[in-house]
Amino acid sequence: MTARLIDTSALLYNVPGQGTVSRTCRTWALADGSTLSLVTELPTDRGMSITNAAEEVRAALEAKWGAACRIVEHYPWQGDEHYDEQTLTPAGTTRWRRLNAGELRAELGLGGDNARADAAGETE
């Protein structure tokens, strides 16, 4: 395993006009010394989505883990599970890049029959 889970908690981010929004967030320490935070968006979650609140999500995670933290949005939706990594352009604009689910799960040490639940933070 190349990564070590170091935190499982609710990510709280503030959205103007909505107040505080919460999403499940799991963070790993990676072999290169950086961190990766996997933020899960469920179809039943309330408040602004992690994609639409990308700046607020980034600000909350950078305050906790630093600017080198990789941010991956996880959508464990039945039939359309996917992972999108947020990146910043040199101009400071957010872009998204679809990740290969199998490669990400392997990097984080997730897998087997409970891969979806593991990635969503539903099991330990």
Image (tube, grey):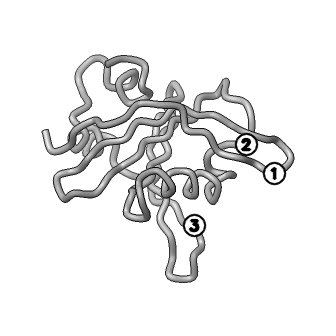
Report crowding for label 2: few under 14, some 14 to 19, many 20 or more residues within 10 A (C-alpha).
some
Residue found at x 64% / y 54%:
56
Q: Amino acid under label 2? A: Met
Q: Which mark is residue 76?
A: none
Q: Which residue is at a point 50% across and 45% down the rendered structure image?
A: 73
Q: Residue furthest left?
A: 1
CA–CA distance in space, label 1 to label 3? 18 Å
Any mark on residue 48, and which? 2
Q: Which mark is residue 16?
A: 1
Q: Is residue 44 left or right of residue 103?
A: right
In this view, the residue in front, 8 or 97, is: 8
24 versus 122 height, above or below: below
Percent position (x, y) of residue 36? 35, 49
Earlier residue among tags 3 and 2:
2
Residue 54 point in image, percent of width and height: 61, 55
Total marks shown come to: 3
Left or right of 13, for residue 122? left
Q: Are marks 3 and 2 in contact (CB under 8 Å)?
A: no
Can you identify the residue that label 3 sits on?
A: 94
Tell us which disc is closer to us: 1 or 2.
1
Q: Amino acid at mark 1?
A: Pro
Looking at marks 1 and 2 on the same chain, the residue that comes earlier in the sequence is marked by 1
